[in-house]
Amino acid sequence: MAKQLTPFGLEVKKRLLDLGLNQKEFCKENDIPMNRLSEVLYGDRLAKKYREKIAKLLDIRMTA
C-alpha cells in the first residue's frame, strides 16, 4: 500500500507546483534535507522545526 500525503503535505506539493519547483530544488535552495521533507509530507515524523520553516517559505498555513 502506498503512503498518503498529509493535508499539510498536499498543500506543500500544490504550492511547489504553483511556484514551478520540484522537491529537490526546494530542499537545496532552502537547506532542508530531502528525507526530512519527505517525513513531513507523509507524517512519518513531526519535525516541527522543518515543518514551520517549510510553511513560512511557501507562505502556507500550518495544519494539525
Image: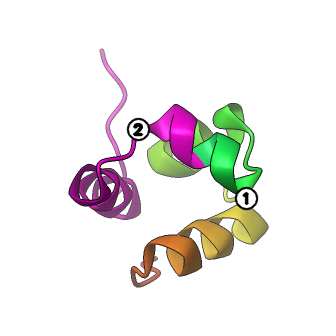
Cα separation between marks 1 and 2: 20 Å
| Residue range of the region highlighted in magenta in the rendering | 1-26
Q: Is residue 15 magenta?
A: yes
Q: Which mark is residue 22?
A: 2
Q: Nearer the viewer, residue 23 or 3?
A: 23
Depth check, mark 1 against mark 2: the one in front is 2
Position of residue 28 measured from the top left corner of the image (x, y, whole percent): 68, 41
* Position of residue 52 measured from the top left corner of the image (x, y, whole percent): 64, 76
Most prominent secondary structure in the magenta stretch?
helix
Q: Quadrant of residue 15?
A: bottom left
From this view, report whether residue 51 is shown above or below residue 20: below
Q: Is residue 44 visible?
A: no
At 37% from the left edge and 28% from the top edge, which residue is drawn? 3
- Locate residue 49 relative to residue 58 in the image: left or right: right
- Using the rendered image of the protein, determine whether residue 23 is visible from the camera's viewpoint: yes
Which x, y percent locates residue 27?
63, 44
Q: Amino acid at mark 2?
A: Asn
Would residue 23 be found to the left or right of residue 54 on screen? left
* Residue matched to label 1: 47
Q: Are marks 1 and 2 in contact (CB under 8 Å)?
A: no
Report the quarter where the N terminus lies.
top left
- Residue ID at (47%, 81%): 62
The magenta stretch spans residue 9: yes
Q: Residues within 10 Å of mark 1 (few under 14, many from 20)?
A: few
Q: Residue at x 61, y 41 (%)?
A: 39
